Image (cartoon, rainbow, N blue to C red):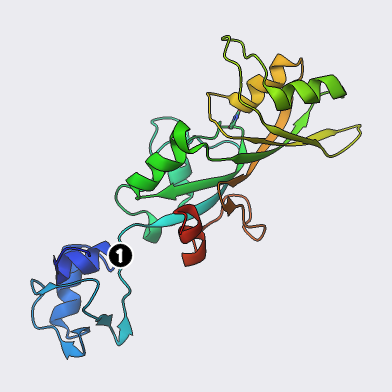
Amino acid sequence: MTQRQRLDKFLAHMRFGTRREVKTLVRAGRVTINGKVATSSDLSLCPDRDVVAVDGQPVKYQEYFYLMLNKPAGYLTATKDRLAPTVLDLVPEEWRVKDLAPVGRLDKDTEGLLLLTTDGPLTHRLLSPTWETPKTYFLRIDGEPTDEELKTLACGVVLDDGYRTRPAEVKLLTTGPEWELVLTICEGKFHQVKRMLQAVGKQVTYLQRRSMGTLSLDPGLALGECRPLTAEEINGLKGR
Ligand code: URA
């Protein structure tokens, strides 16, 4: 059950503007609560029970916000940086809500699926080693991998710092001249995919994340575009 909230806080949270802008909406008589015109922006309401509408359109309360971004190369996975553009720069202004942050990290030159959310508990769970969230990557490498190397990648490979990776799924897609693989790992060490390939003497020339847990990159999302997650996608990530 969500705590009671003031109308202005509720509407500001639901991206109807600043508290001041929301006050103007209320004063103009454009906001109703359970069908009655709201007379003041400091009215208290229950987000789960009361129906708030703006210009006759009901506003469905959402505690957290979730965006899927198709990250292009050249952007840092950070919320701000003094020098380089960040993934937050790709989020349209109206979706750039307070506390929106990327879940995990893709390298500057990596493309593909990046989840951004305000949901701290979900972020924690998706990144926690205990939950072993699978992440699938598409990659190109600079030479032909032998069957032995593919087996090593799948069984566990020793990285440059001595860490042995957990079992992974590896599938070779092509037979040259461009060597393409799909790799699924259930952990997230720093530069893990590139270091795994390095450990078998290969260099990654292109890297794209295709999925994280139950969430898959929307093929309709162009590089640099983002969209809110559907209710089904959110429920999937939460294991509902
Ligand atoms: N592994 C890498 O090496 N880089 C990424 O961006 C993601 C996983």
Residue 61 in the image, given as x and y percentages of width and height = 30, 69
Furthest-bottom residue in this view = 35
* Residue 136 in the image: above or below residue 69: above
Relative height, residue 119 to residue 129 (above, below) = below
Quickly name the residue at label 1.
Answer: 15
Residue 217 position (above or below residue 140):
below
Q: Position of residue 143 (x, y in %)?
A: 85, 23
Q: Circle 1 — which element? A: loop
Residue, x 47% and y 31% (percent of image)?
129
Quadrant (top left/top right/bottom left/bottom right) for the N terminus? bottom left
> Residue 5: image x %, image y %?
14, 66
Quadrant location of residue 26? bottom left
Which sits in the foreground, 116 or 188? 188
Q: Quick check: can you spot residue 145? A: no
Q: Residue at x 43, y 45 (%)?
A: 88
Q: Quadrant of the C terminus?
A: bottom left
